[in-house]
Image (cartoon, helix red, strand yellow):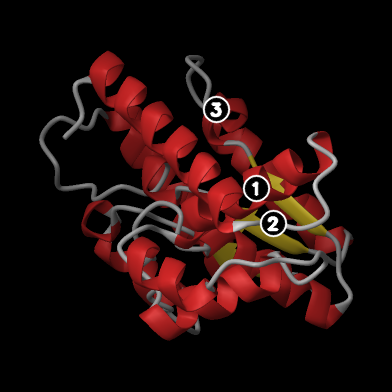
Amino acid sequence: IGPPGTGKTAAAHAIAAELSLPVAVTSIAALTSSYLGETARNIESVVRFAESTPCVLVFDEIDAIAGERSRPQDHAEMRRVVATVLQLLDEVQGESLLVATSNHPSLIDYALWRRFDEVIGLSLLSEDGVQALIDLRTKSTRRSFSSSKWATRLKDLPPAQIEAICTDALRRRALNNEPQITDELFTVSFNSWQRRQASITALTGDI
């Protein structure tokens, strides 16, 4: 559990790599149906697949299908879906590992928590962690900028956004045929990201 961009799904992929298992990420949009009972059957099909095929099965944003049943706005069908999820998790067998992620843990049905062996909270990185991430993502090329300076500047951003800035800087270096990533090039990538975020905020009204 944790805010968007803190590496929840990436952590599931890392676990899968350590276990040498493929990753199967469920699409909540694909699972959900307007037809009575279809959503529950779709979820059961996914779990049965994981029982027969060893993998790391990721239920991304599980609060969308396992929300708290006491909420007055939830209709009977969604309560049946939650009940199905709980039953399937109780009965699941096989060698697969089930991972659920959520940005909104307060919305998850209380009974779901005990179905999982571990609950891992992810948050923003420390300044040292940000520097390590920048170093990791830019280690494949020469550079002439201070990762510690940029770690101080980017420490309030989620890891996914920091990675996006690093990737953009690497792309610009390649497209411009630059011998290394300079501070100026990294600044251009950061400014580009800021403009993009401003555009999103203007369109959505987010603060």
Residue 39 position, x and y percent, is 54, 30
Residue 62 numbered mark, or none? none
Q: Which quarter shows the N terminus?
A: bottom left
| For marks 2 and 1 on the same chain, the one whose residue lies earlier in the sequence | 1
- C-alpha separation, residue under disc 1 versus residue under disc 3: 33 Å
Q: Which residue is mark 1?
A: 169
> Tag 3: residue type?
Ala
> Tag 2: residue type?
Ile
**Observer-nearest of 46 and 28:** 28
- C-alpha separation, residue under disc 3 versus residue under disc 2: 39 Å
Q: Are marks 2 and 1 in contact (CB under 8 Å)?
A: yes
In the image, taking residue 5 as reference, residue 157 lies left or right, namely left
Residue 33 position, x and y percent, is 53, 20
Circle 3: element type: helix
Q: Which residue is mark 2?
A: 181
Q: Which residue is mark 3?
A: 29
Q: Which of the 4 image quarters holds residue 143?
A: bottom right
In the image, taking residue 46 as reference, residue 36 lies left or right, namely left
Residue at position x 54%, y 69% from top? 90
Residue 125 position, x and y percent, is 40, 75
Residue 144 vs 39, above or below: the answer is below
Residue at position x 38%, y 79% from top? 127
Which dot, 3 or 2, sits closer to the camera?
2
Label 1 crowd (10 A; few <14 / some 14-19 / many >=20): many
Residue at position x 81%, y 34% from top? 175
Residue 9 vs 126, above or below: the answer is above
